[in-house]
Image: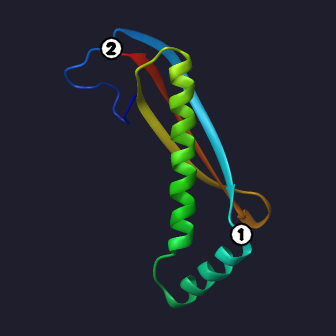
Amino acid sequence: MLLTTTPTVEGYPVKQYLGVVSSETIIGANAIRDFMAGIRDFFGGRSGSYETVLREAKDTALNELTQRAQQLGANAVVGIDLDYETVGANGSMLMVTASGTAVVL
């Protein structure tokens, strides 16, 4: 399955458009991550624990997007858009949405 943010794939014409596919994932950051991120915020530097959560949420959203496209018979998803939002009380959860167009190349 080919996943791309571009609307086309050079050298591979779209034979069939199967429709828009989307997926959502919501992941919570635990208290330890919040505590460590607070320390990083105070002293500066990257928060590896939050970066790990972001990657996990993105990967989950893209895996679900792939599954939905495969169910339609697609071999690619073009024009993928990823959005990141915080939700929940005090923004304690991260939501990642992915959408794109399922196609047959």
5 left or right, relative to 29 = left
- Kindly state the secondary structure of the residue where label 1 is placed: loop
Which numbered dot is residue 30? 1
- Kindly state the secondary structure of the residue where label 2 is placed: loop
45 left or right, relative to 6 = right
Which numbered dot is residue 14? 2
Camera-side residue of 28 and 92: 28
Residue appearing at x 67%, y 81% in the figure: 35
Camera-side residue of 23 and 85: 23
| Pair 2/1: label in front | 1
Where residue 56 sits in the image (x, y, percent)? 55, 54
Name the quadrant containing residue 32: bottom right
Tell me the quarter of the image containing the C terminus. top left
Where residue 61 sits in the image (x, y, percent)? 56, 42
100 left or right, relative to 5 = right
Residue appearing at x 52%, y 90% in the figure: 43
The tag earlier along the polypeptide, 2 or 1, is: 2
Per the model, the C-alpha gap separating discs 2 and 1 is 43 Å
13 left or right, relative to 39 = left
Q: How many marks?
A: 2
Residue most toward the bottom?
A: 43
